[in-house]
Amino acid sequence: MPRPPRHPFTAVLRRALPKPRRPAAEPYLRLLDRRFAVLARISSGADPRATKASTSAPERRLARRFLAGRKGGWHDGDENLVRGYLDRWERGPAVRARARGLLEAAAALAGMRPPRGALWFFLWEMESVLAGLFEADKQERPC
């Protein structure tokens, strides 16, 4: 399967990571691009069950490892900025609306190049939304 194109959010995140970037960041950045590609398919009407692989247990563990050191690295302003995009009410199937909401928030954040805390909070929230979209294993928390 060809590698999905880099999402603008992933490019902004790549630049926000401290230099030198840890080698462990690269697998997460690739996962993030795959997840944005999956969200794009879902928001356009693809069956979410057909795209469940982007939230497999190993991929959730990879995301948790990447986000573990960044948990709480944001403040109320970062949360308010991100929630302004994620908490919008939308019509249509809930799964498609949530996928579209994540994509729109990621694109908006990439366009404004927000502080790192907003990036971390968005990624943290994204894990929770993805777990809800795909009904992650009950024994594993999203983050």
Image (tube, rainbow, N blue to C red):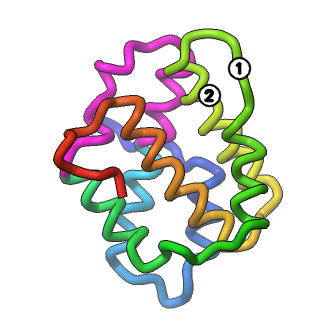
Percent coordinates x, y for residue 142 in the rendering: 34, 51
Q: Could you tell me if the residues under marks 2 and 1 are in contact, i.e. CB atoms within 8 Å?
A: yes
Q: In which quarter of the image is the C terminus?
A: bottom left
Q: Is residue 37 above or below residue 32?
A: above
Q: In this view, does 40 lie above or below 56?
A: above
Density class for disc 2 (Cα within 10 Å; few <14, some 14-19, many ≥20) is many
Q: Residue 90 carries which label?
A: 1
Query: Given the image, on which type of amino acid does mark 1 rest?
Result: Glu
Does 34 sit left or right of 13 as displayed?
left
Q: Is residue 24 above or below residue 27?
A: below
Residue at the location (20% across, 39% down)?
137
Q: Where are the magenta residues, as a range?
A: 35-57
Q: How many labels does the image show?
A: 2
Does 53 sit left or right of 93 as displayed?
left
Residue that label 2 marks: 100
Residue at the location (42% across, 68% down)?
67
Q: Is mark 1 on a helix, strand or loop?
A: loop
Ranked by sequence position, the earlier of labels 2 and 1 is 1
Magenta span dominant secondary structure: helix
Density class for disc 1 (Cα within 10 Å; few <14, some 14-19, many ≥20) is few
- Of tags 2 and 1, which is closer to the observer? 1
Residue at the location (43% across, 32% down)?
38
Q: Is mark 2 on a helix, strand or loop?
A: helix
